[in-house]
Image (spheres, rainbow, N blue to C red):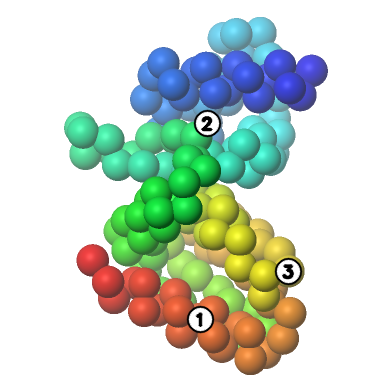
Amino acid sequence: MKSGRHAKILEIISNSAVETQDELLERLGEEGYRVTQATVSRDIKDLRLVKTLGGDGKYRYTAAQNNSADIRSTFSQLFSSSVLSIDRAQNIVVIKTLSGMANAVCAALDTMGNNSIVGTLAGDDTIFIACRANDSAQELGDYLKQQKNMK
């Protein structure tokens, strides 16, 4: 069931521009899949979908590439255009994004494979990143602030 839904999600995003989780949820419903927003959110994370800028100037979900250079480029572009602020509290890094972009930024961050990250949690406009230690969070926060300043 889950693998069939995942295949349908990949088919949907490859055939049409899907900009939001709600839009994906609606399209899945049209295809006969009865799922919740939380399920769609988990599916997006499981499939490592990221939002990329289309030729029309709108962001849409796409499947992350396995090429690490492409992942870094996508992450950098998405991060610099979506993140508003980065802060830290001990071993937690908090990122504020434009409304609706936290999940995409978080999914892109997850594809980077940083071993100092224990886990991530994204809402609509906020990401919490739990790091293994305070110094790891400091280093990650500094790195992310550096990425934000790069265009």
* Residue at 72 percent of width and 86 percent of height: 133
Disc 3 versus disc 2: nearer the observer: 3
Q: Name the residue under label 3.
A: 118
- Secondary element at tag 1: helix
As displayed, is residue 151 above or below residue 26?
below
Describe residue 113's horizontal placement relative to residue 86 as left or right: right
Amino acid at pointer 2: Asp
Q: Position of residue 14 (x, y in %)?
A: 44, 21
Secondary structure found at label 3: strand
Q: In this view, does 35 lie to the left or right of 27?
A: right
Instruction: Specify which label sits upstream in the sequence, 1 or 3.
Output: 3
Residue 47 visible: yes
The answer to which quarter of the image holds residue 73 is bottom left
Residue at coordinates 63% horizontally, 91% vertically from top-left?
A: 135
Q: Name the residue under label 1.
A: 141
- Tag 2, which secondary structure? helix
Q: Position of residue 113 (x, y in %)?
A: 61, 61
Residue 22's label in the rendered image is 2
What whole-number distance in Å separates the C-alpha atoms at marks 1 and 3?
14 Å
Mark 1: amino acid? Gly
Q: Which amino acid does label 3 sit on?
A: Val
Q: Mark 2 or mark 3, which is nearer the start of the sequence?
A: 2
Q: In 3D space, how far apart are the residues under numbered discs 3 and 2 (Cα atoms)?
A: 28 Å
Label 1 and label 2: CA atoms lie apart by: 30 Å
Residue 121 appears at what percent x and percent y? 65, 59
Image mark for residue 13: none
- Image height of 102 relative to 141, above or below: above
Farthest right residue in view = 1
